Amino acid sequence: MTERFISSTLNKKNKTQDNKLRPLKFMNFPGQIKVKERLELYVEAAKGRKEPLGHLLLSGPPGLGKTTLAYIIANEKGANIKTTSGPIIDKPGDLAGLLTSLTDGDILFIDEIHRLNTTVEEYLYSAMEDFFIDIILEQGPGSRSVRLNLPHFTLMGATTRQGMLSAPLRSRFGLSCRLDYYDAPELQQIVERSAGILNIDIEPGGASEIAGRCRGTPRIANNLLCWTRDYAQVKSNNIVSSENASLALEMLNIDENGLDEMDNRILEAIIHNFNGGPVGLKNISVSVSEDEGTIEEVYEPFLIQEGFMVRTPKGRAATPKAWRKLGLSSKHVQTDR
């Protein structure tokens, strides 16, 4: 059976680059081995019973493949999928319109589900458990409630902030899977597969160079692949070699550890301005002129995962690995403070 693309009736999009690179079979999805095993079993069991899938929550940092897995699950199950996102569903009526347009076995995929309006979220409780919602018509003394029966659908949610989901909503998902950052060999597979789809002439060394600098994230890997293709086209012979990839990524200030300019500025601020820490997030934010939330959500997770920074009760601190990266000893003490 050849791969096919499943179109959302809510979001009619052209076949963008992301769509072209998105696999629709578990066998073509590199990495996340344990998560894939659970999901394959989950889908196979539902198919064997000829029942709709149970509700499913996918969580993890952005760019790791939550949406891709949703489409793979729908494709492998043979179910229709409709996609939307949490902030778009503003009123209970919006949710009612979505749910009543589904049929038995359909999948409703809500991206960034932690950003759902609280009122809308409460309507989901009865929809997920008992497949009905009660809608209040009109207001005041003449208000009345109308019960809408729903088909047996599957709610699939994706979130980058699982802790922001309320306990009642989180407990209604039958299966919860967290995606983690990828390792370099898995990312090299992804880069080489994407290069084949996009007809990019790439050498194993070039793919390895990109895989080692993309912060463990397939989305970033694909973006860097396209950038290195452009570099090779203009500066070289259209071949993404190890040397071309390295030079292309240096133009973006991405070093051999995958750290970009802001990552390095954060480490330099902690070490040079605050003697390695611990230091509060607000002070770091002021030092590098970047929003606290952006530092905490975008830069800090990778720095911690790679061992350059730690969180302590008193604040953030640079590790000996960060000191060595800047060519300093962790015993170094500033004398001008």
Image (cartoon, rainbow, N blue to C red):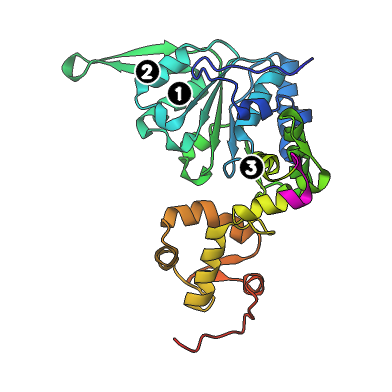
Q: Quadrant of residue 276?
A: bottom right
Query: Mark 2 and mark 1 in contact (Cβ < 8 Å)?
Result: yes
Q: Is residue 93 above or below residue 316?
A: above
**What is the CA distance from the residue labelled 1 to the residue labelled 2?**
9 Å
Q: Which mark is residue 179?
A: none
Residue at label 3? 227
Instruction: Rate crowding at label 1 as few (under 14), some (14 to 19) or many (20 or more) other CA atoms within 10 Å.
Output: some
Residue position marked by numbered label 2 in the rendering: 134
Name the mark nearer the viewer: 2 or 3.
3
Q: Position of residue 28 (x, y in %)?
A: 77, 30
Q: CA distance from mark 2 to mark 3?
A: 51 Å
Mark closest to the chain's N terminus, 2 or 3: 2
Query: How dense is the environment of label 2, judged by Cα within 10 Å: few (below 14), some, or many (20 and up)?
Result: some
**Does residue 136 sit above or below 317 in this rendering?**
above
How far across and down, in percent of the image, does residue 323 sit? Answer: 62, 74
Question: CA–CA distance between discs 3 and 1?
Answer: 47 Å
Residue at 59% over, 52% down = 252
Q: Is residue 279 above or below residue 204?
A: below
Q: Is residue 145 left or right of residue 108?
A: left
Q: Nearer the viewer, residue 126 or 248?
A: 248
Residue visible at 74% across and 34% down in the picture: 200
x, y percent for residue 111: 51, 32
Crowd tier of the residue under label 3, counting other residues whose Cα lies within 10 Å: few below 14, some 14–19, many 20 or above: some
The one nearer the camera, 185 or 237, is: 237
From the image, tell me which residue sits under label 1. Answer: 126
User: Which residue type carries mark 1?
Assistant: Ser
* Left or right of residue 202: residue 250: left
Residue 308 in picture, x, y percent from top left = 62, 65
Q: Amino acid at mark 2?
A: Asp
Residue 282 seen:
yes
